Image: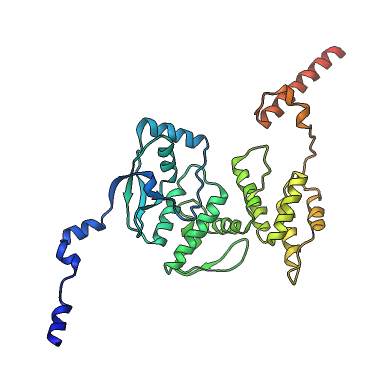
Protein backbone atom coordinates (compact mmCIF):
# COMPACT_ATOMS: atom_id res chain seq x y z
CA UNK A 1 0.00 0.00 0.00
CA UNK A 2 2.82 2.38 0.86
CA UNK A 3 4.37 1.69 -2.52
CA UNK A 4 1.16 2.63 -4.33
CA UNK A 5 0.95 5.88 -2.35
CA UNK A 6 4.47 6.75 -3.37
CA UNK A 7 3.63 6.09 -6.98
CA UNK A 8 0.51 8.26 -6.73
CA UNK A 9 2.48 11.05 -5.10
CA UNK A 10 4.81 11.22 -8.08
CA UNK A 11 2.10 11.18 -10.74
CA UNK A 12 2.22 14.24 -13.03
CA UNK A 13 -0.59 16.77 -12.79
CA UNK A 14 -3.14 17.29 -15.55
CA UNK A 15 -1.29 20.49 -16.53
CA UNK A 16 1.95 18.53 -16.86
CA UNK A 17 0.25 15.94 -19.03
CA UNK A 18 -1.43 18.34 -21.43
CA UNK A 19 0.92 21.32 -21.59
CA UNK A 20 4.58 21.89 -22.15
CA UNK A 21 6.93 24.04 -20.11
CA UNK A 22 7.08 26.44 -23.07
CA UNK A 23 3.29 26.87 -23.20
CA UNK A 24 3.08 27.45 -19.44
CA UNK A 25 5.79 30.11 -19.64
CA UNK A 26 4.00 31.73 -22.58
CA UNK A 27 0.77 31.91 -20.55
CA UNK A 28 2.52 34.11 -18.00
CA UNK A 29 3.73 36.59 -20.60
CA UNK A 30 1.90 39.80 -21.41
CA UNK A 31 0.02 39.79 -24.67
CA UNK A 32 -1.95 42.28 -26.72
CA UNK A 33 -5.45 41.23 -27.71
CA UNK A 34 -8.46 42.99 -29.18
CA UNK A 35 -11.39 43.00 -26.74
CA UNK A 36 -14.96 44.18 -26.92
CA UNK A 37 -15.43 47.03 -24.38
CA UNK A 38 -18.42 45.12 -22.97
CA UNK A 39 -15.98 42.41 -21.81
CA UNK A 40 -14.08 44.91 -19.65
CA UNK A 41 -15.49 46.03 -16.30
CA UNK A 42 -14.34 49.25 -14.63
CA UNK A 43 -11.78 49.20 -11.84
CA UNK A 44 -13.57 48.95 -8.43
CA UNK A 45 -13.81 52.37 -6.71
CA UNK A 46 -11.91 53.96 -9.57
CA UNK A 47 -10.95 57.42 -8.23
CA UNK A 48 -10.35 59.07 -11.61
CA UNK A 49 -13.49 60.48 -13.22
CA UNK A 50 -14.30 59.98 -16.90
CA UNK A 51 -15.63 63.43 -17.76
CA UNK A 52 -17.39 64.51 -20.96
CA UNK A 53 -15.23 67.61 -21.28
CA UNK A 54 -13.35 69.21 -24.17
CA UNK A 55 -10.44 66.78 -23.69
CA UNK A 56 -12.80 63.81 -24.06
CA UNK A 57 -14.32 65.30 -27.23
CA UNK A 58 -10.80 65.67 -28.68
CA UNK A 59 -10.01 62.07 -27.73
CA UNK A 60 -13.19 60.82 -29.45
CA UNK A 61 -12.23 62.69 -32.64
CA UNK A 62 -8.71 61.24 -32.47
CA UNK A 63 -10.05 57.71 -32.00
CA UNK A 64 -12.38 58.12 -34.98
CA UNK A 65 -9.48 59.24 -37.19
CA UNK A 66 -6.61 57.09 -35.96
CA UNK A 67 -8.08 54.40 -33.69
CA UNK A 68 -6.67 53.53 -30.25
CA UNK A 69 -2.93 54.20 -30.57
CA UNK A 70 -1.98 53.18 -27.02
CA UNK A 71 -3.41 49.85 -25.83
CA UNK A 72 -5.35 49.81 -22.56
CA UNK A 73 -4.09 47.69 -19.67
CA UNK A 74 -6.44 45.02 -18.30
CA UNK A 75 -6.20 42.05 -16.00
CA UNK A 76 -8.14 38.79 -16.30
CA UNK A 77 -10.89 38.17 -13.73
CA UNK A 78 -11.15 34.73 -12.07
CA UNK A 79 -14.83 34.45 -13.03
CA UNK A 80 -14.12 35.37 -16.66
CA UNK A 81 -13.85 38.62 -18.56
CA UNK A 82 -11.41 41.42 -17.81
CA UNK A 83 -11.02 44.38 -15.47
CA UNK A 84 -9.69 47.73 -16.66
CA UNK A 85 -6.51 48.89 -14.94
CA UNK A 86 -5.51 51.78 -17.18
CA UNK A 87 -7.54 53.08 -20.11
CA UNK A 88 -11.02 54.01 -18.85
CA UNK A 89 -11.10 57.18 -20.98
CA UNK A 90 -9.88 55.33 -24.08
CA UNK A 91 -12.57 52.69 -23.55
CA UNK A 92 -15.29 55.35 -23.21
CA UNK A 93 -14.03 57.22 -26.28
CA UNK A 94 -14.00 53.99 -28.32
CA UNK A 95 -17.57 53.18 -27.26
CA UNK A 96 -18.78 56.67 -28.20
CA UNK A 97 -16.90 56.42 -31.51
CA UNK A 98 -18.75 53.18 -32.28
CA UNK A 99 -15.78 50.81 -31.95
CA UNK A 100 -16.55 47.19 -31.03
CA UNK A 101 -12.95 46.29 -30.22
CA UNK A 102 -10.01 48.00 -28.53
CA UNK A 103 -6.39 46.78 -28.21
CA UNK A 104 -5.50 45.73 -24.66
CA UNK A 105 -2.42 44.49 -22.86
CA UNK A 106 -3.44 41.56 -20.65
CA UNK A 107 -1.37 41.41 -17.48
CA UNK A 108 -1.77 39.16 -14.46
CA UNK A 109 -1.85 41.43 -11.39
CA UNK A 110 -3.05 40.87 -7.86
CA UNK A 111 -5.34 43.49 -6.27
CA UNK A 112 -2.61 45.61 -4.70
CA UNK A 113 -0.35 45.48 -7.75
CA UNK A 114 -3.31 46.56 -9.89
CA UNK A 115 -4.09 49.50 -7.58
CA UNK A 116 -0.52 50.80 -7.71
CA UNK A 117 -0.32 50.51 -11.51
CA UNK A 118 -3.78 52.10 -11.90
CA UNK A 119 -2.87 55.09 -9.72
CA UNK A 120 0.56 55.70 -11.25
CA UNK A 121 -0.67 55.48 -14.84
CA UNK A 122 -3.62 57.82 -14.30
CA UNK A 123 -1.50 60.44 -12.53
CA UNK A 124 0.10 61.11 -15.92
CA UNK A 125 -3.07 62.86 -17.11
CA UNK A 126 -2.73 66.52 -18.04
CA UNK A 127 -5.26 67.60 -15.40
CA UNK A 128 -6.00 65.64 -12.24
CA UNK A 129 -8.53 67.02 -9.76
CA UNK A 130 -7.72 67.21 -6.01
CA UNK A 131 -10.52 64.74 -5.19
CA UNK A 132 -9.03 62.26 -7.67
CA UNK A 133 -5.54 62.55 -6.18
CA UNK A 134 -6.97 62.32 -2.66
CA UNK A 135 -8.61 58.91 -3.10
CA UNK A 136 -5.92 57.64 -5.48
CA UNK A 137 -3.11 58.38 -3.03
CA UNK A 138 -5.08 56.78 -0.19
CA UNK A 139 -5.69 53.64 -2.25
CA UNK A 140 -2.01 53.42 -3.20
CA UNK A 141 -0.75 53.98 0.34
CA UNK A 142 -3.14 51.33 1.68
CA UNK A 143 -1.99 48.90 -1.03
CA UNK A 144 1.66 49.52 -0.12
CA UNK A 145 0.87 48.83 3.54
CA UNK A 146 -0.78 45.54 2.65
CA UNK A 147 2.30 44.62 0.62
CA UNK A 148 4.34 44.91 3.79
CA UNK A 149 5.83 48.32 3.07
CA UNK A 150 4.80 49.69 6.45
CA UNK A 151 4.35 53.43 6.97
CA UNK A 152 3.79 54.43 10.60
CA UNK A 153 2.39 57.94 10.49
CA UNK A 154 2.06 60.69 13.04
CA UNK A 155 -0.91 63.05 12.98
CA UNK A 156 1.10 66.24 12.53
CA UNK A 157 -1.08 68.32 10.12
CA UNK A 158 1.80 70.35 8.70
CA UNK A 159 4.68 67.93 8.16
CA UNK A 160 3.69 64.29 8.74
CA UNK A 161 6.68 62.22 9.78
CA UNK A 162 6.95 58.71 8.39
CA UNK A 163 9.10 55.75 9.35
CA UNK A 164 9.62 52.34 7.83
CA UNK A 165 10.89 51.06 4.52
CA UNK A 166 8.61 53.15 2.30
CA UNK A 167 7.01 56.57 2.75
CA UNK A 168 4.39 58.90 1.31
CA UNK A 169 7.13 60.46 -0.81
CA UNK A 170 7.08 57.26 -2.90
CA UNK A 171 3.28 57.39 -3.12
CA UNK A 172 3.40 60.89 -4.63
CA UNK A 173 6.41 60.34 -6.90
CA UNK A 174 4.40 59.79 -10.10
CA UNK A 175 2.20 62.80 -9.37
CA UNK A 176 5.12 65.09 -8.57
CA UNK A 177 3.93 65.72 -4.99
CA UNK A 178 6.00 65.82 -1.82
CA UNK A 179 5.38 63.65 1.22
CA UNK A 180 3.62 66.52 3.00
CA UNK A 181 1.44 67.31 -0.01
CA UNK A 182 0.42 63.65 -0.31
CA UNK A 183 -0.74 63.72 3.31
CA UNK A 184 -2.73 66.87 2.65
CA UNK A 185 -4.44 65.24 -0.29
CA UNK A 186 -5.31 62.15 1.76
CA UNK A 187 -6.88 64.39 4.44
CA UNK A 188 -9.34 65.59 1.78
CA UNK A 189 -10.95 62.13 1.80
CA UNK A 190 -12.46 63.14 5.18
CA UNK A 191 -14.45 65.98 3.59
CA UNK A 192 -18.11 65.61 2.73
CA UNK A 193 -18.63 65.41 -1.08
CA UNK A 194 -20.15 68.90 -1.28
CA UNK A 195 -17.07 70.60 0.19
CA UNK A 196 -14.66 68.34 -1.71
CA UNK A 197 -16.34 69.52 -4.91
CA UNK A 198 -15.46 73.11 -3.97
CA UNK A 199 -11.79 72.08 -3.82
CA UNK A 200 -12.10 70.65 -7.34
CA UNK A 201 -13.68 73.93 -8.43
CA UNK A 202 -10.48 75.74 -7.46
CA UNK A 203 -8.72 73.77 -10.22
CA UNK A 204 -11.55 74.02 -12.75
CA UNK A 205 -11.61 77.81 -12.11
CA UNK A 206 -15.21 78.41 -13.11
CA UNK A 207 -15.94 81.95 -11.82
CA UNK A 208 -19.61 81.10 -11.32
CA UNK A 209 -18.87 78.28 -8.85
CA UNK A 210 -17.83 78.51 -5.20
CA UNK A 211 -14.19 77.53 -4.71
CA UNK A 212 -12.04 76.67 -1.73
CA UNK A 213 -8.26 76.40 -1.62
CA UNK A 214 -6.33 73.32 -0.53
CA UNK A 215 -5.00 74.46 2.85
CA UNK A 216 -8.27 75.69 4.37
CA UNK A 217 -9.93 72.54 3.01
CA UNK A 218 -7.40 70.39 4.89
CA UNK A 219 -8.29 72.19 8.15
CA UNK A 220 -12.02 71.73 7.49
CA UNK A 221 -11.45 67.97 7.03
CA UNK A 222 -11.02 67.73 10.82
CA UNK A 223 -14.56 68.99 11.46
CA UNK A 224 -17.28 66.47 12.23
CA UNK A 225 -19.43 65.51 9.23
CA UNK A 226 -22.43 67.30 10.75
CA UNK A 227 -20.37 70.46 11.23
CA UNK A 228 -19.17 70.26 7.63
CA UNK A 229 -22.77 69.95 6.42
CA UNK A 230 -23.76 73.02 8.49
CA UNK A 231 -20.78 74.94 7.13
CA UNK A 232 -21.58 74.06 3.52
CA UNK A 233 -25.13 75.37 3.96
CA UNK A 234 -23.72 78.62 5.39
CA UNK A 235 -21.17 78.97 2.57
CA UNK A 236 -23.92 78.45 0.01
CA UNK A 237 -26.13 81.05 1.70
CA UNK A 238 -23.38 83.66 2.11
CA UNK A 239 -21.80 82.83 -1.27
CA UNK A 240 -18.27 82.70 0.15
CA UNK A 241 -15.78 80.22 1.60
CA UNK A 242 -13.53 80.50 4.68
CA UNK A 243 -9.95 81.71 4.58
CA UNK A 244 -7.14 79.54 5.92
CA UNK A 245 -7.18 81.46 9.23
CA UNK A 246 -10.95 81.07 9.56
CA UNK A 247 -10.72 77.34 8.81
CA UNK A 248 -8.04 76.91 11.50
CA UNK A 249 -10.28 78.73 13.99
CA UNK A 250 -13.21 76.44 13.14
CA UNK A 251 -11.07 73.35 13.60
CA UNK A 252 -9.74 74.55 16.96
CA UNK A 253 -13.25 75.34 18.23
CA UNK A 254 -14.53 71.96 17.02
CA UNK A 255 -11.69 70.02 18.65
CA UNK A 256 -12.34 71.87 21.93
CA UNK A 257 -15.82 70.32 22.05
CA UNK A 258 -16.12 67.19 24.17
CA UNK A 259 -18.64 64.41 24.55
CA UNK A 260 -19.64 64.47 20.90
CA UNK A 261 -20.97 68.02 21.16
CA UNK A 262 -20.90 69.73 17.79
CA UNK A 263 -19.95 73.27 16.93
CA UNK A 264 -23.04 75.51 16.84
CA UNK A 265 -24.12 76.96 13.49
CA UNK A 266 -24.13 80.43 15.04
CA UNK A 267 -20.42 80.05 15.81
CA UNK A 268 -19.71 79.07 12.20
CA UNK A 269 -21.72 82.03 10.89
CA UNK A 270 -19.87 84.38 13.24
CA UNK A 271 -16.48 83.16 11.98
CA UNK A 272 -17.57 83.36 8.34
CA UNK A 273 -18.71 86.98 8.78
CA UNK A 274 -15.36 88.07 10.18
CA UNK A 275 -13.58 90.35 7.74
CA UNK A 276 -10.68 88.63 6.03
CA UNK A 277 -7.33 90.53 6.08
CA UNK A 278 -7.20 90.65 2.28
CA UNK A 279 -10.94 90.92 1.79
CA UNK A 280 -12.04 93.29 -0.94
CA UNK A 281 -15.40 94.98 -0.96
CA UNK A 282 -17.65 93.41 -3.57
CA UNK A 283 -20.36 95.11 -5.61
CA UNK A 284 -22.95 92.72 -7.00
CA UNK A 285 -25.58 93.27 -9.69
CA UNK A 286 -28.56 90.88 -9.86
CA UNK A 287 -28.07 88.76 -12.98
CA UNK A 288 -31.65 89.27 -14.18
CA UNK A 289 -30.94 93.02 -14.54
CA UNK A 290 -28.19 92.46 -17.13
CA UNK A 291 -29.28 89.23 -18.85
CA UNK A 292 -30.87 91.11 -21.78
CA UNK A 293 -27.51 92.66 -22.69
CA UNK A 294 -25.67 89.34 -23.09
CA UNK A 295 -26.19 86.13 -25.06
CA UNK A 296 -27.18 83.06 -23.01
CA UNK A 297 -24.14 81.21 -21.71
CA UNK A 298 -21.80 84.21 -21.79
CA UNK A 299 -18.99 83.53 -19.22
CA UNK A 300 -19.10 85.65 -16.06
CA UNK A 301 -15.58 86.97 -16.69
CA UNK A 302 -16.56 88.22 -20.16
CA UNK A 303 -19.64 89.93 -18.69
CA UNK A 304 -17.48 91.66 -16.08
CA UNK A 305 -14.91 92.76 -18.69
CA UNK A 306 -17.65 94.13 -20.97
CA UNK A 307 -19.22 96.12 -18.12
CA UNK A 308 -15.83 97.61 -17.17
CA UNK A 309 -15.15 98.65 -20.78
CA UNK A 310 -18.62 100.20 -21.01
CA UNK A 311 -18.01 102.18 -17.82
CA UNK A 312 -14.63 103.40 -19.13
CA UNK A 313 -16.31 104.63 -22.33
CA UNK A 314 -19.03 106.30 -20.27
CA UNK A 315 -16.44 108.09 -18.11
CA UNK A 316 -14.57 109.35 -21.19
CA UNK A 317 -17.84 110.62 -22.68
CA UNK A 318 -18.75 112.42 -19.45
CA UNK A 319 -15.33 114.08 -19.29
CA UNK A 320 -15.63 115.29 -22.89
CA UNK A 321 -19.04 116.80 -22.13
CA UNK A 322 -17.64 118.63 -19.10
CA UNK A 323 -14.95 120.39 -21.15
Could you tell me residue 3's position as x and y percent? 12, 85
Please name the residue shown 78% across and 45% down the image. 238
| 88 to the left or right of 192 | left
Q: Up-down: is 289 above or below 282?
A: above
Q: Quadrant of the N terminus?
A: bottom left
Q: Up-down: is 319 above or below 78?
A: above
Could you tell me residue 29's position as x and y percent? 26, 55
* Colouring method of the image: rainbow
Please name the residue shown 43% across and 69% down the image. 148
Could you tell me residue 180's position as x and y percent? 56, 58
| 286 to the left or right of 87 | right
Q: Up-down: is 95 above or below 247?
A: above
Q: Nearer the viewer, residue 208 or 297?
A: 297
Q: Nearer the viewer, residue 315 or 225?
A: 225
| 301 to the left or right of 112 | right
Q: Quadrant of the C terminus?
A: top right
| 319 to the left or right of 176 | right
Could you tell me residue 41's position as x and y percent? 41, 51
* Picture quadrant of residue 288: top right
Amino acid sequence: MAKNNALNFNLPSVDDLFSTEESRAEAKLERIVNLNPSEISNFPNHPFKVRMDSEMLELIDSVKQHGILLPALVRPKPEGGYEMVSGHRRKKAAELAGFTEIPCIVRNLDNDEAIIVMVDSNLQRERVLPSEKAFAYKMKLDAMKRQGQRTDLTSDPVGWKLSGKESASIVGKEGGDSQTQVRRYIRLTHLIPEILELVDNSVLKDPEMLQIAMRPAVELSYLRKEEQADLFAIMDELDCTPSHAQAIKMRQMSEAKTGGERLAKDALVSIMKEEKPNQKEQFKIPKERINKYFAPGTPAQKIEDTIIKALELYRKRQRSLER
